[in-house]
Image (cartoon, rainbow, N blue to C red):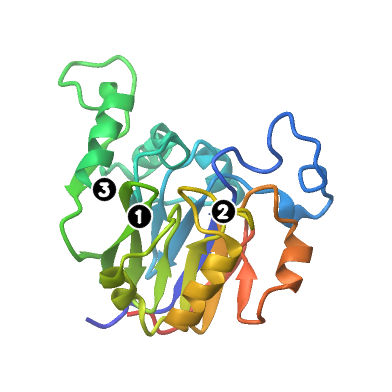
Amino acid sequence: MGAPGPLKITVLGSGTSVGVPTPGCHCRVCQSSDPRDNRLRPSVLLSYGGYNVVIDTTPDFRTQVLRARLDRLDAVLFTHSHADHLMGLDDVRPFNFRQGTHIPVFADTETLSAIQRCFPYIFRCEERQSSVPQLEIHTLNGPFELFGREFLPVRLLHGRSSIFGFRFGSAAYLTDHSEIPAESMDRLRGLDVLFLDALRHKPHPTHSTVEHSIRTVEQLAPRRAFFTHISHDLPHRETENALPPHIRLAYDGLEITVEEAG
């Protein structure tokens, strides 16, 4: 399938589950004057062919789409059911108003169950006095097409939990993972751009470290790699200066064009 023109990836948020600055913290990163050290919860916007697709609706979703000046939303993909990836879902309503359409949502069965528990009012069949998000639900069960581009769910391990990243042409977005299973590694060869989790240097039971993610990049050999889901343990400038030149830290507002994603 041919790609519908170039793909632009906008980083809506590059931070960990509590964001940076972290409430109540006065460390040097939380007090940094470098705007790249201000990190909302992790999400990206994919723009191509006049369409906009968001991966994860974080608690910061409203702030993120306002900052990105997003005036259209065509689909939402979810990586998993944790609050920092899910809880902004109600804020898709203005796009329903503007577009007059349901918004397709793609997630695995566990995440869809969490959405139903967290937002039960969306799914009640009753007459309402106020608006609710209008969603078109799709369960992840293999590759799927969105607006002329194929998306491939990629299984990841987030501690003991199984979650998903996504490959779309020659780019992939992987967040919240501690390990990438061998069969998933095979699905991530030949990339132009790879986003992957790199929480901090100190080991964590459910997230990749900087060092572990560097090794993953070495194995997969993408042309460019960007670390995301970053904690306040990593000052942007200092950390990036110690990375190989083809690996950078993502930051909020970063825009990348993938010319030949298919």
Which residue is depicted at the point 77% across and 48% down?
Answer: 29
Residue at the spot of label 2: 203
Frontmost residue, 241 versus 74 = 241
The residue type indicated by label 3 comes to: Ala
The residues bearing labels 2 and 3 have C-alpha atoms spaced at a distance of 28 Å
Q: Position of residue 89 (x, y in %)?
A: 39, 36
Q: Quadrant of residue 177?
A: bottom left
With 148 as the anchor, is 219 left or right in this view? Answer: right
Residue at the spot of label 1: 157
Q: Secondary structure at mark 3?
A: strand
Q: Secondary structure at mark 2?
A: loop
Q: Position of residue 62 (x, y in %)?
A: 52, 39
The residue type indicated by label 2 comes to: Pro
Q: Nearer the viewer, mark 2 or mark 3?
A: 2
The residue type indicated by label 1 comes to: Leu
Q: Quadrant of residue 255?
A: bottom right
Residue at the spot of label 3: 107
Q: Nearer the viewer, mark 2 or mark 1?
A: 2
With 70 as the anchor, is 73 left or right in this view? Answer: left
With 132 as the anchor, is 70 left or right in this view? Answer: right
> Mark 1 Cα within 10 Å, few/some/many (few <14, many 20+)?
some
